[in-house]
Amino acid sequence: MERQPGTWKTLLTQTTAPGAVVLIRLYVGAIFLSEGILKFLFPDELGTGRFDTAGIPAPGLFAPLDGALEIISGALILAGLLVRLAAVPMVVNMLGALAITKLPILWGGAPLFEGASGWWDFAHASRTDLALLCGSLFLLVAGAGAYSLDARLRTGSPAARTGAVR
């Protein structure tokens, strides 16, 4: 992919990804947006209380911060606006979630269900986090795709906006 010299806006919004990327944006953005909102609606179960139980320091600071970043990033990803920028904190978010809440399962944490062992319990518990990490990494690399506000911010024809025409 040839990068055109230009402003930060050009670098953030450039994408050669097809329109089908909208499907990845829909699932990644909707999950982050809804999970961010849920951290505020149910703070004891999904916000500050959960962060405290997981041993995250300063849960009163980090849970609302995480929720706000999920809401903002999720909305930007859904809209297809500054998708690469919005994906960065979500990659960090998912790496943190995996490291803090899922990796301990491999080291003999309490099994989630009867008969589970370390690896299979980890695989089951981390499936959503891994899917969101992969989806966020994909959006970071590929960009928002043809059906996005990022593509509309580009000048020229729709093909030029997505980088299909050189």
Image (cartoon, rainbow, N blue to C red):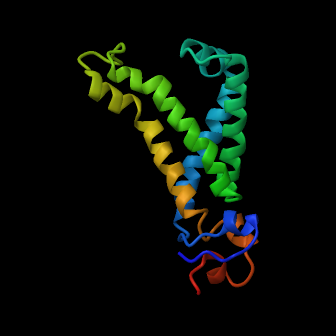
Residue located 33% across and 16% down the image: 111
Seen in the image, is 131 located left or right of residue 123? Answer: right
Q: Is 103 in front, or is 67?
A: 103
Q: Against 33, is 12 above or below? A: below
State which quadrant residue 131 falls in.
top left
Position of the C terminus, as image quadrant, is: bottom right
* Residue farthest toward the front in the current orientation of the protein: 5
> Where does the image place residue 25, in percent across and percent down from the top left?
58, 55
Q: Can you give x and y, in whole percent of width and height, for residue 126 in the image? A: 41, 32
With respect to residue 106, does 152 lie above or below?
A: below
| Residue at left offset 75%, top offset 79% | 155
Q: Which residue is drawn at 67% across and 53% down?
A: 85
Residue 90 horizontal side relative to residue 157, left or right: left
User: Is residue 154 or residue 107 the one in the foreground?
Assistant: 107
Left or right relative to 137: residue 106: left
Task: Please name the residue shown 35% across and 28% down the image.
Answer: 122
Is 60 situated above or below 3? above
Q: In this view, does 121 lie above or below 134?
A: above
Horizontal and vertical percent for residue 103?
Answer: 40, 26
- Quarter of the rendering containing residue 41: top right
Q: Residue furthest bottom?
A: 166
